[in-house]
Image (cartoon, rainbow, N blue to C red):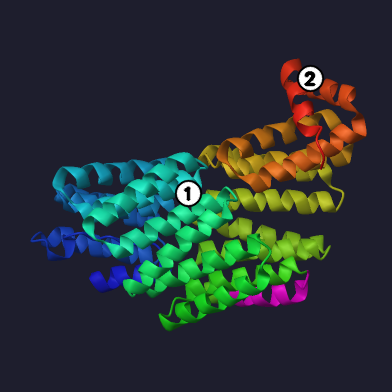
Amino acid sequence: MREMAKQLTIATGRAIYLGGIPDASDSKLKKLTARGLSAMRKQQWDRAVVLFQKALDHAGRSESAVAIHCLTGVCHFVPCRWQQALDNFNQAAGLADEFGDKAGKVIALGYRGSTLSATGARAEAEVAFTDSLYAARELGDRDGEARALSNLGLVYRARNELDQALKYYREALAMAREADNSVVQANNLNNIGLTYMDRGELNEAQKHFEQARALYRSVGSFRGEASVLCSIASIHQDVEELDEALHILKKALALRRKIGDKQGEASALNSIGNVYREKHEPVAALRHYRESLAIARQIGDSLVEAKSFGNIGLALSDRGKHDQGLQHIEAALTKAREIGNQETQAFSLCNMGIIYAKQGFSDKAIKHMSESRAIFTAIGVRAGVERTTWNLRRFLKRMGRERFVAGCAEAGMTSEDAEELAGSLAGPS
């Protein structure tokens, strides 16, 4: 069972916690847990949940229940059932406190933070990651400490506080090396590379990506290698070497198909579609986006489904089919709201604003852009704030302050809010 959990950790990139279950006296509990792990390996998340629920009936209110709730939470987390995931991780954290399971507490708090982060609640996520960090330090769990530091780096990178993000990633990398955890080392090398990309330091980014790729290969993590190939492709995309980016992304897609990573396959197809869209080949882009959408629906991944809908909408708009484009982006917005992912909601609103602007509906464009900007501001996504600010400033310059404010009012804003928005945008670009 421990070996199965280890392989699952490598295959999924997620910590699989078993607590004392492998040494438990209840043979039925162990058998059900093993069957649940086997279902997870096959990405049969609903089947795994059923098996873990049966295992929980055997575990009762005991220390073993900490691990079962963590495992159940992961099975809800992957297909974006955030509330069910959060409920299980919260229960796991509470039981870990009750039974003094410090290792379980580290894992449960980390997963709680990841779930909150996935919904855009990054301030709450930061608290959970910090609590996980303190719990890991109290336990002397260097591996858990490295994971918590890495997660904090993700929070700060999302806020565009890149120096602080790099600080956390480097600390996590050093600890992962101490703990001889190659997967966590590779994860952090990849994250460091992405942060250097954000800073425009592409040579440093490439160096860290190659180091990450070598480590993933050394432990046989095809999933990790595929992830870092996507990172390397993004460098080529950034410097407009689009054919090379496509070549690398197709390698990543092949790896994900080889291991049956449907979620990764859908994401890679979206990335390939994005490159085709940059190459002004909307038909090829649409083909890949639609394939991604079909897979996302098949596996119940609502987040990738939302992103695919949004991408299809933009590609349709590129072909002049603005109304169809809006319908697909509205579907993305609805799906993002269903799962509580604020970042995807904000991007959807922004993209709807762009299409409305193409159609000449300035009031609708302003309404959606300002709503998008408010969400990006609330969740601390600076890149999104900058994108929407740039677009709104264009409207202000083109329309003039009086017409812009009037347009905001027509879109449903109060005159005070409209004046305040216009004033905030009036500075230099």
What residue would you read off at disc 2?
Answer: 409
Q: Is residue 84 above or below residue 292?
A: above
> In the rendered image, which quarter is residue 13 located in?
bottom left
The answer to whether residue 241 is magenta is: yes
Q: Is residue 421 above or below residue 316?
A: above
Front in this rendered view, residue 88 or 152: 152
- Coordinates of residue 384 in the picture (x, y in percent): 67, 45
**Rounded to the nearest whole Å, what is the CA distance between mark 2 and mark 1?**
36 Å
- Quadrant containing the C terminus in the rendered view: top right
The answer to whether residue 344 is magenta is: no
Q: Amino acid at mark 2?
A: Ala
Looking at the rendering, the stretch of residues picked out in magenta corresponds to 240-252
Residue ID at (41%, 40%): 83
Q: Is residue 55 above or below residue 233?
A: above
Residue ID at (71%, 72%): 236
Residue ID at (48%, 59%): 167
- Can residue 60 be spotted in the picture? no
Instruction: Assign the magenta stretch its main secondary structure.
Output: helix
Q: Which mark is residue 16?
A: none
Is tag 2's residue or tag 1's residue first in the polypeptide sequence? 1
Question: Which one is in front in this view, the residue at disc 2 or the one at disc 1?
Answer: 2
170 lies left or right of 329: left
> In the rendered image, which quarter is residue 9 located in?
bottom left
- Quadrant containing the N terminus in the rendered view: bottom left
Q: Amino acid at mark 1?
A: Cys
What residue would you read off at disc 1?
Answer: 80
Residue ID at (69%, 77%): 247
- Coordinates of residue 279 in the picture (x, y in percent): 81, 66
- Coordinates of residue 80 in the picture (x, y in percent): 47, 49
110 lies left or right of 210: left
Which class describes the residues within 10 Å of circle 2: few (<14), some (14-19), or many (20+)? some
